[in-house]
Image: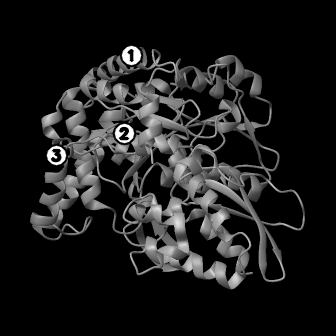
Amino acid sequence: MNREDFPMLKQDIIYLDNGATSFKPQCVIDKIVDYYSNYSANAHRGDYDISYKVDLEYENAREEVVDFINAKSKEEVIFTSGSTDSLNMIVNGFFAKLVEPGDEILITTSEHASNVLPWFKLATDYGCVVKFIPLDDYLHVTLENVKMSITPKTKIIALAHVTNVIGDVRPIKEIAKIAHENNIFLVVDGAQSVPHMKVDVQDLDVDFLTFSAHKMLGPTGVGVLYGKKELLEDLVPINLGGGMNESFDSPSEVYLKDLPTRLEAGTPNIAGVIGFGEAIRYLKKIGMEKIEERERQLREYLIEKLVKIPHLDIINLESESGIVAFNVNDIFSQDVAYYLNKYNICVRAGNHCAKLTKNVTGVDNSLRVSLYFYNTETEIDELVELLSDKEKIVREMI
Amino acid sequence: MDHYSNPRNKKRMDDSKYIKQNTRNTSCIDNLDIYCLIDRDIIKDITFDGEACAISISSASIMTTLLKDKTITEAKEIINNIDNMLNDLEYDKDLIKEASVYENTKNTSRKTCAWLPYAGIKKIIEK
């Protein structure tokens, strides 16, 4: 649906790598061009009209995010360069000064690198321990396993809302309840969930949530760090400089601005943030429930066809999101991706930045199809037809 | 294709006389180990093992047949010519024999797959 809004979809291309990044609708592109063409000034310097307009548009975008995830106020929404940046800020600015040696951090083996490596570093630098919540037979996180993994030393649970290879949707609301009953902080990587479903931070009661604009029709280089206000007040800025200070005279006399500006040092990605605001407006106009429903239909359609192909091994049959990971028996995933590319079909091959996942799936690499609402049944039909003929794959993959 | 379906010299060598060199692409998931036995100035034996795409596997297989029993100087010459071919420069087709099939990868993302085993052996013989 809404395919006519996307210039990239006018090309002869079937794009099934939306987990990596999404295409942009014309209105988002126009919004960015409009900034660079008509009011290309810096932010927070409202001494003249075009700069004042920048402030208005920039803060409007923040209001859009606040409303989109149902944050309590603008102080809770910080613009970053992406989900990775947000997670690193949380780890280094908030938890680094809070943790003590021996504290435990719970993650899983199916997390993306950006929700693994910052915690590994925290563990190395401060003597904490990273532990893994066991996954069940479907590679999902269960509440029982969360409870079982908690010890008196557990300080943090950090999980993807939806994982980027398995595509399972974690029961975040219930996990938040368990975490808070045990005085544990819950950090949620929403990079694969916020673009695809309604995410309400107050309803879920997460302490921190991170996501990236480019996976939800926005530009690259922009992301969000959501945190409960009382927690963000204690998040120490890693970057210091222009825009975030109120005044300074000497090392002992530095006064910083209030949230959220305090955590956005330097000239921000103004065009990106304003474009992101437009992307959210666009998503809201369609409606997240409608988007979720459409993706569910597409996934069911795809799975129904893939399971009939005998030489395919589907890794995440039981997941609910628009992510389907599979292999063609005896053929290296990258060769299949290359073969599909000959027919202008874009899928991802590899370990998808989740290098620990192979420990649980037993599969080093896989093909990943990740859907968005603008994909169609016809596109899926073409993919399925090409995958159905194993001999053709072998013949044409070089 | 035959070098992919029936790769030559694809075996791991635990003999400590062999020099082992891992080689992988930063942009993809190919991951090969090259094993090389050098006696004085001559490549006495060369094998490989690992998980990689059809282009990398077949290229590694062809490489082992090309470089075996060659002197280091001869090997370097062959590798340079393959490098030239993949970078659209002049090269000696007779010298690189079967490896010339990868000429058509030079303008694609698969160029690095064809080059992968040579990146590994280069590290060994430059040591």
Q: Chain of mark 3?
A: A
Q: Amino acid under label 2?
A: Asn
Question: As displayed, is residue A222 above or below residue A290?
Answer: below
The residue that mark 1 highlights is A300
Instruction: Work out how far the residue at label 1 is from the one at label 3, CA to CA, in angstroms.
Output: 27 Å
- Whether residue A53 sits left or right of residue A228 in the image: it is left
Q: Position of residue A392 (x, y in %)?
A: 41, 34
Q: Which residue is mark 2?
A: A18
Give A337 or B64, whichever is nearer the viewer.
B64
Tell me the subunit letter for badge 2. A
The picture quadrant where one finds residue A53 is bottom left
Residue that appears at 79% across and 30% down:
A151
Amino acid type assigned to the residue bearing label 3 in the image = Pro
Sequence order check: which comes first, mark 2 or mark 3?
3
Q: Quadrant of residue A256?
A: bottom left
**Label whose residue precedes the other's in the sequence (1 or 2):** 2
Outermost residue toward the front?
B94
Few, some or many C-alpha atoms within 10 Å of disc 2 (few <14, some 14-19, many ≥20)?
many
Tag on residue A7? Answer: 3
Do discs 2 and 3 belong to a common subunit? yes
Q: Does dot 3 land on a helix, a strand or a loop?
A: helix
**Residue A235 visible in this rendered orientation of the protein:** no
Q: Position of residue A23 (x, y in %)?
A: 27, 44
The residue drawn where x is 38% and y is 69% is A266
Task: Give whichever of A330, A324 is nearer the camera.
Answer: A330
Query: In the image, residue A252 lies at what x, y percent?
Result: 57, 75
Q: Seen in the image, is A312 located left or right of residue B67?
A: left
Query: Looking at the picture, which amino acid does disc 1 mark?
Result: Glu
- Image x and y of residue A311, in percent: 52, 23
Element type at mark 1:
helix
Closer-to-camera residue (A396/A31) = A396
**Is there a contact, CB below 8 Å, between mark 2 and mark 3?**
no
